Every structure is written in structure tokens, then in C-alpha cells.
Amino acid sequence: MSKKTSSNCMLAREVCQLKALVRAQNKQLCLLVKQVKDNCKQEGQSGSETKESTLRNLNPCIKCLNPDFLYHLGMDTESTNFPNVFGDVRFVCLSGPAQRAEKFASYFMEAIGLKLNAAVKLKDLAAGGHRYAMFKAGPVLCVSHGIGCPSLSIVLNELIKMMHHAKCHDPVFIRIGSCGGIGLESGTVIITKEAVNAELTPKYEVIVHGKPVQYPAQLDEDLAKELHSIADSCNADYDTILGKTMCAHDFYEGQSRLDGAFCDYTVEAKKAYLQKLADNCVTNIEMESLGFAAITHRAGIRAAVVCFTIVNRLENDQVTASPETMGEWQSRPQELIARYIRKSIYGSDDTCEEDDEELKKCDCDENAGCC
């Protein structure tokens, strides 16, 4: 076969693959359009003439900010038409690293049927802020939040204002992350039913004008139960449980580790504290759930925290799993949230096997156009 013929064959295959991609994606777009139309009909029947944000307790000064600068996301209400760009967002999924947010977005694109060509890369919509990463996958917004409640609170404040300016209706916020398990096998998925601080109370404290102010840290109980129900139907070879999550201020001393740069307590003190957590039904430790629960609850946002364990803290402090194993564990909550989103959008959490078969078809198979 000549080089020219081989090149033509390769081009023909790529054209066929692109046609198949368009066909499969059009099916999913039709479903999404139908969902939007159904929502519009419901809003019309309920008598709502103008779509408005459903968030509550927001700063009254926001309406005076013209434009409003979302500094850390690198955008403002003057240069960005928020209702046009973000008005269709129904799910906001947050995770620590920027790379994880991008991977989640790509995964969700395929999970809801909006498959990407290999040459296409998702755009980081928060690149102008140089601090966080943000990727849009249809009605799903995937955002990095960094490490700890201070970093999380900054991006949550700006995301909540974004949802307000975009007039989003009942967005669901979900944090997907890693954690240390308390007496649980690594790789276990934990859906937080209650977030508590190191003193085991569900209160998030902020220092305002030099004085401590506490806010209740409350997640949506029904959402947690729904996620757990979906997980139960998967028949996976790992456990997914509802649990109580302790939110620490840091990774080392705040989590009673022995491997940090400083350690002024004994091995016995560490063991006693971790056992106290276990005795009080704490299943895992991480660093964001408390602030996430309190801030979303304050804004009237339905929210959930879903984490995978990377170490059993009753046995070890250091994380020694291989990158391959970590990748497999990381995919577990990702798959669960994808099933929830598919169910919410399409009424079913079935995977798009029909579309996968569609992508394998080639127009040239019948017309002898491909070599």
C-alpha cells in the first residue's frame, strides 16, 4: 500500500470516527434539551415569570457591586455574561488538586454522554485567577479548592456568588476527595452524614472582628441517603458507607500524626485520641468537610461530601499506595457521583452502552471507504 493510499485510509477513518462521535453526542444533546424544556414547562406552570437564584442569606451588598469581581476565579460580571455561561449549571463538584478537577470534568463529559474527541482539551475557565482551576462539562462544573477550609472558603464564596449572578436554580454541591479512615480498609468510600471538628461538635468557627463566630455544619441528609442507595445498587467489590467525618485544621499534628516535622505527644496519646474518635463513631478524617457543610448550608445549598480512604489511621500514618492504586480508589466516588448525575438528568443511572456501540460503527464499513 502506498503512502498516499495509507494516508487517505487514515483520513477516512478519522472522518468516520468524527461522524460517529457527532451521532452519539447528538443523542445525548437531545436528551439534555428535552430536560431543559421540561424544566421550563414546570417553571411556567408554577407561575415563575423570571428565573432567579434560589440561594439564601447572601450579602445584600452584592447587588451594589457593579461589576462584581470574582478575583480568585479571574472573572467579573462586566466581562462575563454569567447567566449565558453558567446558567445551566446544576451540579458543582469540588476537589483538592487542579488535575483532579480536570480529570473529573473529562470523566463526567463521557458519563453524561458528551464525549470528547481525543484532540479536544477542556478549557480552564479560572485560569485568569492563577489560583484555582474550573472546568465545565455541560451542567456540571468541576472546580479545585486547594487544601483546607481557608482555601476552600475562598472559592466557595466566589462560586456561590457566581451561582447567584447566573441565576442558577437549586444547584447541588458535592466535594469529592481523599481521607484517612478510622479502622476501615483503604479504598473504602465514605459518604459523610455528619461533619464535626476536632472537639467532635458540628460547628464551623470563623474569627470575625477578632471574635469567634460559629456556624452549624449541616449536609443534606436526603442527598447522602440517595447517594448511598445508588452505591448499594452497584454491587461493587468495595464498601460504601455513611459515616461521621472529623475535619482537621492541618495534615500532621491536627490529625495526630507521628511523621510531621514536629511532634510533642507520645505514641500512646496518638492511639488514645484515634480510639476516642472511633468510640464516637468517627469513620474518617480530612480537612474540608466542616467548612464545606457550614458554608453551603448557610446559602441554602444541598450538599454532600464523598471521600475515599487512602490509609487506615489505626494502623499507619503515611500514605504508601502506588499511583495506580490511588487512581483506582479515586475513580470510586467519581463513578458514584456520575451515576447520581445521570439519574438526576435522565431519570436513570444506566451507562451509555448504546452510544459506545454507536462510536464503534463506521460508515465506511458498508461503503468500503475505509481500508
Image (spheres, rainbow, N blue to C red):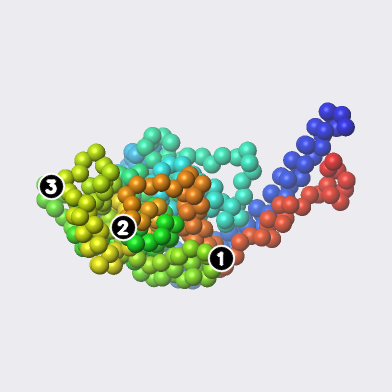
Query: What residue do we see at 56% from left, 39% from top?
Result: 121
First along the sequence among labels 2 and 3: 3
State which quarter of the image contains the N terminus: top right
Q: Which of these two is toward me, 162 or 28?
A: 28
Q: Find disc 2 in the rendering and name its residue.
A: 314
Label 2, label 3: how far apart the Cα atoms are: 39 Å
In the image, is residue 34 above or below residue 208?
Answer: below
Q: Which of these two is toward me, 83 or 326?
A: 326
Can you tell which mark lies on residue 349?
A: 1
Label 1, label 2: how far apart the Cα atoms are: 36 Å
Q: Name the image quarter holding residue 48.
A: bottom left
> Which element carries disc 3, helix, strand or loop?
loop
Specify the amino acid type for callout 3: His
Alpha-carbon neighbours of circle 3 within 10 Å: few (<14), some, or many (≥20)? few
Q: Name the image quarter holding residue 204.
A: bottom left
> Which element carries disc 2, helix, strand or loop?
loop
Label 3, label 1: how far apart the Cα atoms are: 47 Å
Q: Name the image quarter holding residue 313.
A: bottom left
